[in-house]
Amino acid sequence: MNNDCRIGLVQMESIVGNTERNFNHIINLTGIAHKQGISFLCFPECALNGYSPNDAAEIGTTLESRWIKQLKECSQDFNMTLLVGMAEQRIDSPRPYISQVILSPEEDSKVYRKVHLGRSELAYFTPGNEFPVFSAHGTSFAVGICWDWHFPETAAIYSLKGAEILFAPHASPKIAGDRKQLWLRYLGTRAYDNSVYIGACNLIGSNGKSKEFSGGVLVIGPKGEVFDQDHIGDEGILTVNLPADRINHIRRPERSSMRDSFFLADRRKELYHELIELDIIDKA
């Protein structure tokens, strides 16, 4: 990281199919973030269109939609990178993607498409096939969406590609349990093992249909440490300053202390072929 980075993680309600309402809410939160000096503002999974697999084909929008164009202008005006979740329609795919559009000043719009779909999503969405790393504000960053983070390889690939901050937007329902407690079981490990910052956020409230979301915002440091958090009871932004010297020290070429090891630098990848070749053992 070239310099310290101020990020914002959004907890918000998003109504299925009411894109105009959701868009206006995103714009309002972006204005608040600008006043707080935030460089990266991450919104939850499908924040623009609302999360509902059954309705995704009807409510999805394209990257050329007026909403994305206006959000791009907002990014330029505020000199802020926006990471906005959406159901992305494409003419070359029969089913939409679960996408996070990346809107940075002076850059073309970019996108991450969810690679690991949950079982309840497989019939409604098209999976992505790439793990792109982006750069803005002197920082390399990447995105994984919700279910992606249950696969350790995701974080490892991103870290090996140079990502310093990993964003984890979610649309996790209340029925799954307390989001922060669940995140602490595995996101801390992803950050610690791969020497990255991880910022997670979740939808909250009703989607206007049958789902209720639990909310949750969390930032974890490159040694698995949880950053101090403001309590956000409803909708709002968790703002956190990420120090550059912390991650730069861990990732420096000369490492003498095991306390600050960059574990990926000591891999023996020539032995890991089994990870690709093996499948689970069926004991049924």
Image: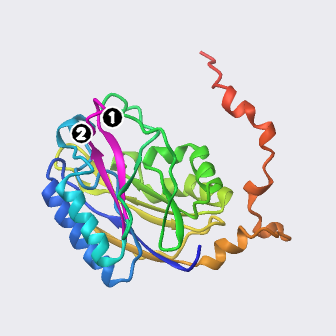
Tell me the residue at 43%/39% (across/down). Answer: 128
Q: How crowded is mark 2: few (under 14 residues within 10 Å), some or many (20 or more)?
A: many
- Residue 22 falls left or right of residue 111: left
Q: Which structural element holds mark 1?
A: loop
Q: In which quarter of the image is the N terminus?
A: bottom right
Tell me the residue at 25%/77% (across/down). Answer: 31
Residue 206 point in image, percent of width and height: 22, 53
Q: Is residue 93 magenta?
A: yes
Q: Find disc 2 in the rendering and name its residue.
A: 56
Amino acid type of the residue that numbered disc 1 sits on in the rendered structure: Phe
- Residue 155 falls left or right of residue 90: right
In this view, 80 is above or below 184: below
Q: Gap between marks 1 and 2, in whole Å?
A: 8 Å
- Residue 75 falls left or right of residue 262: left
Q: Which structural element holds mark 2?
A: helix
User: What's the image's color scheme?
Assistant: rainbow
In the rendered structure, find residue 73 and report the number of the disc placed on it: none
Residue situated in front as seen by the camera: 66 or 260: 66
In this view, 85 is above or below 39: above
Tell me the residue at 80%/54% (across/down). Answer: 266
Amino acid type of the residue that numbered disc 2 sits on in the rendered structure: Ala
Q: Find disc 1 in the rendering and name its residue.
A: 125
The span picked out in magenta is: 81-103
Residues at discs 1 and 2 in contact (Cβ within 8 Å): yes
Residue 245 point in image, percent of width and height: 65, 79
Q: Does the magenta stretch include residue 193?
A: no
User: Residue 27's image quarter?
Assistant: bottom left
Residue 156 point in image, percent of width and height: 63, 50
Secondary structure mostly seen in magenta is strand
User: Residue 39's image quarter?
Assistant: bottom left
- Residue 107 falls left or right of residue 129: left
Q: Quadrant of the C terminus?
A: top right
